[in-house]
Image: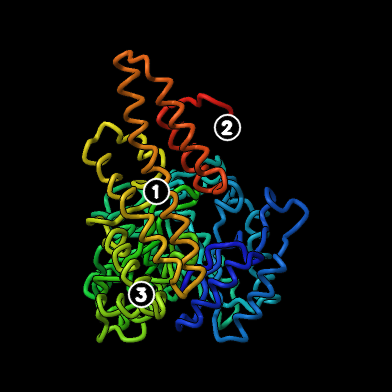
Amino acid sequence: MVKMAGDPAQPETLEHVRYCRSLGFNALWVFSVEAGVWSKQRAPRGLILDGSFLRLARWCRENGMEVWVSLNPTADALEKFVFSDRDDENRLLAFIDALQKKAGIRRFVMSFDDEPTELHALADVFRYGASAATAQVDLAARVRAKLPPGASLFLCGSAYCDGHLGDGTQPYAKAFLAALPKLPADVGIVWTGPEVVSREVTAAGIRATRERLGGRPLLLYDNYPANDNEPGDAISLILGALRNRDPGLRDVLAAYLAAPELPHAASRLTLQTTAAYLADPEGYDPDAAMRAAMAKLGGADPKALDALTTQQLEWGGWVNGRNYWTRWEANPEAAAGRLQDPAYVESFTWTVDRYPGRMMALWNLSDVPFRTVLLQYMRRRLAIARVIPLAVEYRARVRSGDPRVAETVARIDAERRAWKDDADARRIVEAFLTAAQIPSGSPR
C-alpha cells in the first residue's frame, strides 16, 4: 500500500497514484479529509463525499488497487470530537456507510496518531477517565460492530511504535494495553516499528510487538522517506533506498504502507526501491535497487546519470545517519540558526561551486516530474548558499560597527533580485533573511 497524501482533484496526486500502481502497489491509503467531510464542525449541513475522490476510487477498482480510508475523528472534528456524544458517533458511522455504498470502500483505519492522549470533554472524562486510550479503543469496537461482513478495521492509537509503548507503565500506554482485550480480535493495529521513523524493522520485533498487542494483525506504517514537508520550505530531499527491512516481514504483517515524501515526484527514486523490496524481499539488494532506480529515472544520458548519482550521495542517507536531511534540519529557518557554525557555512561554498554545472546535466533526466522537483529543491539550496556568506558578513559588520553595512545590504538585495524570475527560490531566500533578521535596503 502507498499513501495518496494529496488532493484527489490535483493532477500531480493522480499522477502519483498511477505511477505507484505501475510499480506494483495494489492498495492506496487515503485520509478521510481527502475523501470528504462529515463532522458538524466541517460539514454542519451533512456529510459530503468529494467527487474527485469518488472518481479516483472508481479508477482504483478498475485497476486493481484497493482503497483504504483512514478515519481521523479528532482531527476531522477540529479537536472537538466527543467520544460519548451519540451525534458525533452517528455522523462518523454515516460517513463510513456512505464510503461503503458510494465508493466501495471495505478497508478502514481508525486513526488517533499524534492526537491528545488525555480527554478534555467532561462527558468523556466521566465515562472513560482521563486517558484517551480507553475512549479510542471503545469507539473502534463500536465502529467494528457496525461494519458488514467482509469489511475490516485497523486502529492507530496515539501510541504507534515500540518507543511510544515503552515498558507499558506510562499513563497512555498502560491504559491502551489494558483496554485492548475489549477490542474484537480481528481489529488490527497500525504500527511504525521500533521508532516513529524506524532505522530497522525485523520479523522478530514485529512478532514481539504483536504478542504485546494480543496477537492482532499488524499494519506496518513505514515512515521512510516521509519528510514532514507540510510547510513546503525544505531545501533538500530524501533520495535514499529502503534499507534494513527484514525479508520475513512478509510473513508477519497484514499489510505494508509506504509513506512518500512531498512533493510526490520526489519519492519516485525511493518508491522504486520499496516496490523492489515488496516484490522480492529475500532477493532485495538496496544498492542494486538504487542503481536500477537511478538508471530508470536518468535515461540514456550518462552525464545526467552521473549528476544524479552525485546528488543521491549528497541527499541519500539512511534514517538518522549521515546525509539524511529531514525538513526540520534543512529549511531556511534552520539555516539562519546556524550562521555561527563555520563548518556549516563552509559547506554551502561547495554548493555554489558545484550545483550550477550539475543542474545543467540533470536537465537531461528522462523522468520529467522527478527532474522538475529535484531541480526546484537544488535551486532552493543554491539560493540559500549564495546569500549565506553575505548574511555572515552583515552580522559581523553590525557587531563591529563597520560603516560598510549598507554596502552588504545592497549586495544582499542584489541576490534577492537575482531570483526575481523564480518565485519559489525567492520565497526561500526571503524566509531565510527574515529568520536571520536581515533587513532589505530597497523595495522588494
- Residue at mark 2: 444
Q: Is residue 405 left or right of residue 101?
A: left
Residue at the image point whose x is 25% and y is 55% from the top: 320
Residue at the image point whose x is 39% and y is 77% from the top: 301
How far apart marks 2 and 1 lie (CA) works out to 20 Å
SS at circle 3: helix
How far apart marks 1 and 3 lie (CA) works out to 23 Å
**Residue 420 placement (x, y as % from top left):** 56, 43
SS at circle 2: loop
Q: Would you say residue 194 is visible in this rendering? A: no
Label 3 is placed on what type of residue?
Met
Residue at the image point whose x is 40% and y is 45% from the top: 331
Density class for disc 1 (Cα within 10 Å; few <14, some 14-19, many ≥20) is many
**Residue 88 placement (x, y as % from top left):** 64, 54
Q: Would you say residue 310 is visible in this rendering? A: yes
Q: Which of the two labelled residues, at mark 2 and mark 1, occupies the earlier sequence position?
A: 1
Density class for disc 3 (Cα within 10 Å; few <14, some 14-19, many ≥20) is many
How far apart marks 2 and 3 lie (CA) works out to 40 Å
In-front residue for pair 392/161:
392
What is the number of the mark on residue 382?
1
What is the number of the mark on residue 294?
3
Q: Which of the two labelled residues, at mark 1 and mark 3, occupies the earlier sequence position?
A: 3
| Image-quadrant location for residue 385 | top left
Mark 2 in CB contact with mark 3 (< 8 angstroms): no
Q: Is residue 349 left or right of residue 139?
A: left
Label 2 is placed on what type of residue?
Arg
Label 1 is placed on what type of residue?
Leu
